[in-house]
Image: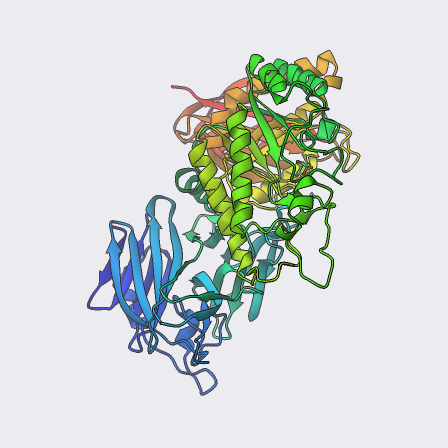
Amino acid sequence: MSVQYLENENIFEIRTNQTSYVFGINEKGTIQHLYWGAQVEAKDCAYVLKSRLHSSFDAEIDRETEEYGGWGGCHYAEPALKVSFADGVRDLKLRYEGYRIIGENEILLRLADVYYPLDVEIHYKAIPEFDLIERYVQVRNGLNESVRIEQVMAAVWTVQALPDYRMTHVTGRWAGEYQLRSTVLSEGKKVLESRRGFTGPHANPWFAVDNGKADETSGNVWFGALGWSGNWKIVAEKSTFGHVRIVGGVNDFDSAFVLVPGEVYTSPVFVGGFTSCGFGQMSRNLHKYQRDYVLPTSKLRKVLYNSWEATEFAVTVEGQKELAQQAAHLGVERFVVDDGWFGQRHSDRAGLGDWYVNEEKFPNGLEELIDHVKGLGMEFGLWVEPESVNPDSDLYRAHPEWVYQFPTREGTQLRNQLLLNVGLPEVKQFILDFMTTLLTKYDIRFIKWDMNRTVTEPGTVVSGQDVDASMWIKHVDHLYAIWAELRERFPKVEFETCAGGGARIDLGILRYADQAWISDNTDARDRLAIQEGFSYAYSPAVMMCWVTESPHGFNGRSLPLLYRFHSAMMGGLGIGANISKWSVEELDEAKRYVELYKEIRPVILNGDLYRLSSLRDSNVAAYQYNSTERSESVVFTFLQSQHFGAEVRHFPLQGLESHASYQVQTDDGEVCVRHGSTLMNIGVPLMLRGDYKSRMIRVKRLE
Ligand code: GLA
């Protein structure tokens, strides 16, 4: 039993394998947070359970550690729920009404306003094995009139008083996503958010908080990740009484909406966790949680070829067939045609929205290519961008009223495209219909679903059409509903989430997506940083990585093929180079690496990741993947550049069995046998010389 109510103390405990999460009902009926961290005896927390008053300026300090508080009375912290009632009352006083324990791991608490029948249910679900708690809320309007919801957050996480607080998060931009940052939290707020209509490359709804001293292997870390692919907000607020609370949910910016009588709003899930073993354990817990609780399937990612960087819009059946031939020779398992196969899509200026096969490019239909790809033993996949439209398209000419736009002004075009208002039932139906036609007519086993611009002018030019601020939420709700429906109709098809790279990856979309395109930047060196940042929150099981050309277009940097493969073997392996132009030697070399990848793939995708060393603070990056039974490890090492002569480096490994013996093999063929304790305390010796050098080491337990 992970959840319990201690009646005498009026306290609730959620207990996971390593943690306790304790809250109680104080004498004022406030649900007061008491403790979250390493396991404690819950009833010992009872003495903290009391309302606190400091002065008439800080009359209800306990409200700052409320599990879920409405804005009203003396509540001044970032509110979890802020409403306006139809009679003009803008004050919410939520009072505890009762609880219900569901099964072993779930508990819900009921709150209601002291006067109006506005009910709130706070849901908690323990994931004991990964020391996580999933939280979400449901708000029900029991009045006979509508209630305006101005802010509704999924959860509030309180971190106990620490001498210092540091928040770790990611930031970035197109082609530079998932850059790690950490910042001291002093009194006031640090806000992470998206107002661009999707998750965004500029921030990602994940956070970690520690006392400034945690590292990869040690220290207390509190963390959380929100499952929402639209506008979101995570606010970390340090009060002047010394604690930090983190509030997160759908962004309230421009998002007030109306709950009609009887209507229920359900928030996204905000999962939170605690570990006393540093950032590495935090990531492993999140990764395993995604594999076991979030992702739609547990299939291993296929080795994929994607034609985008090779051909861009110059798609021809002959060119694609040639690429497919080479891809099959390399051992690729799935061949994906990217943008440019449909409508009048010869550049990014036209065609988006016209989801029929371009007959000039495919005179015998798409079947010719699909049959070719299947004949070569690969699956066929296709790129789509269903939420967008070029003004120069048949779709826009037929339905100009379907796009987001306000009257009295032009809609902003980004990449020459506008966005469809997916919240409209007819647009949702259009997307479902054309996707169903494509997936029924052709033997397509994989869809790369892209979205290449931010949302602007979120309104409509059609008078009488109801596009209020709730569109931000409706767009995402309908997107999820479309993906859910397509997965149901086409269970054999796998989906990739892409938004101009990694701009729509979060625990919401990952309930529907099998894999993620994490950046348009495929430079193998830049990718080490992007992939490392990504791995803080998200699993290698969904992370697609790419081998592309050298020198690479972004930085003009040349990198050896081995380095490019090593960088791309750390998640799902993809190849995106123009392999029609590769030499026989390059193809043979690549073929060997693909074979090798297939051998190590289960360890990479299903194993435990240990970040041994980072280029953020060292000249060498090293990442270790352990199989779950700890019988096998794969270690990738990357030297940035050599200085002051050669040096043998040792990388102490992690997570092995100290008393077992292991065979250690480097990819230049050296083999030796070492004790687990030696490998974990002294490490594997490694000579890396030169610039941009990489090595892979395989470690296998001897039975
Ligand atoms: C986006 C994607 C790329 C590619 C192009 C096609 O930029 O991130 O991978 O699919 O669109 O236009």
User: Is residue 454 positioned above or below 679 on the image?
Assistant: below
In this image, 606 relative to 12: left or right? right
State the image quarter where residue 530 is shown.
top right
Residue at the limit of the structure toward the left, as seen here = 8
Q: Position of residue 236 (x, y in %)?
A: 52, 63
> Does residue 613 appear in the picture of this structure?
yes
State the image quarter where residue 85 is shown.
bottom left
> Does residue 569 appear in the picture of this structure?
no
Residue nearer the viewer, 138 or 135: 138
Residue at the limit of the structure toward the bottom, as seen here = 56
State the image quarter where residue 549 is shown.
top right
Q: Position of residue 310 (x, y in %)?
A: 72, 26
Residue at the limit of the structure toward the right, as seen here = 556
Q: Quadrant of ligand 1?
A: top right
Q: Position of residue 503 (x, y in %)?
A: 61, 46
Residue nearer the viewer, 378 or 295: 378
Residue at figure coordinates x 30%, y 70% from the top left: 96
In this image, 147 relative to 165: left or right? left
